[in-house]
Image (spheres, rainbow, N blue to C red):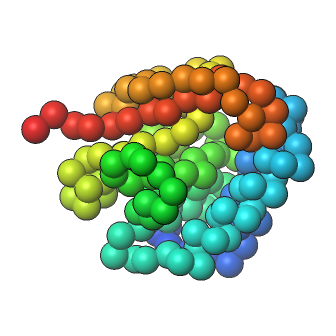
Amino acid sequence: MDPELQIVEGYRPGAVAAITAHHINYYAQEWGFGLAFETKVAIECAAFLQRYDERLDRVWLVVRDGAIEGSLILDHDKSGEMHDGLHLRWFIMSDRLRGTGSGRALMKRAVEFADEAAGGRVWLTTFRGLGAARRLYEDFGFHLASEVEGETWGRTVHEQLWLRHPHP
């Protein structure tokens, strides 16, 4: 990872805006996502940060020259979900950080925390077609649990559920 980059833990001013901007910049350009996706990210990320519990949740931000360039969040909230473990959310790097190892460094921290706090159990939702992310998930012990056609992100994609349940 670039020595000019820092991984900081916890909320920083501008986090919701940066996380939302990185998501919409990438997913609008690459996948045609629009307003429904952008507002979903902003609303859910803001709600998470308002209920953030430093004992159970984690926020990691990649910062370069004072700007938030990437994020990964582990959310312990179980409301409405049927999956065991921590929910990995808002994992994104800015365009200029993709491929630098920053995402791998964030995932390493997330898995280490999950191993301590949740017996290693983590789940995430994404969709088919994100090859680099898929390889990273597999490298850290996730497996594809299900795939269905859906419109969670404002357009039809093959939505995926990935689980990490380490061996005892």
Q: Is residue 67 visible?
A: no
Of 28 and 8, which appears nearest the observer? 28
For the residue pair 69 and 74, the one nearer the viewer reads as 74
- x 34%, y 76%: residue: 55
Residue 85 visible at all: yes
**Closest to the observer, 16 or 67:** 16
- Residue 26 horizontal/vertical position (percent): 78, 39
Image quarter of residue 96? top right
For the point 48% across and 62% down, the residue is: 79
Give me the residue at 84% from left, 49% from top.
36
Relative to residue 98, is residue 140 drawn left or right? Answer: left
Vertical order, 19 against 46 (above or below) = above
Residue 25 in the image: above or below residue 73: above
- Left or right? Give the position of 167 relative to 144: left
Q: Position of residue 61 (x, y in %)?
A: 56, 61
Tell me where residue 131 appears, x and y as whole percent: 58, 21
- Horizontal arrangement in the rendering, residue 137 relative to residue 37 (left or right): left
Q: Residue at x 65, y 64 (%)?
A: 45
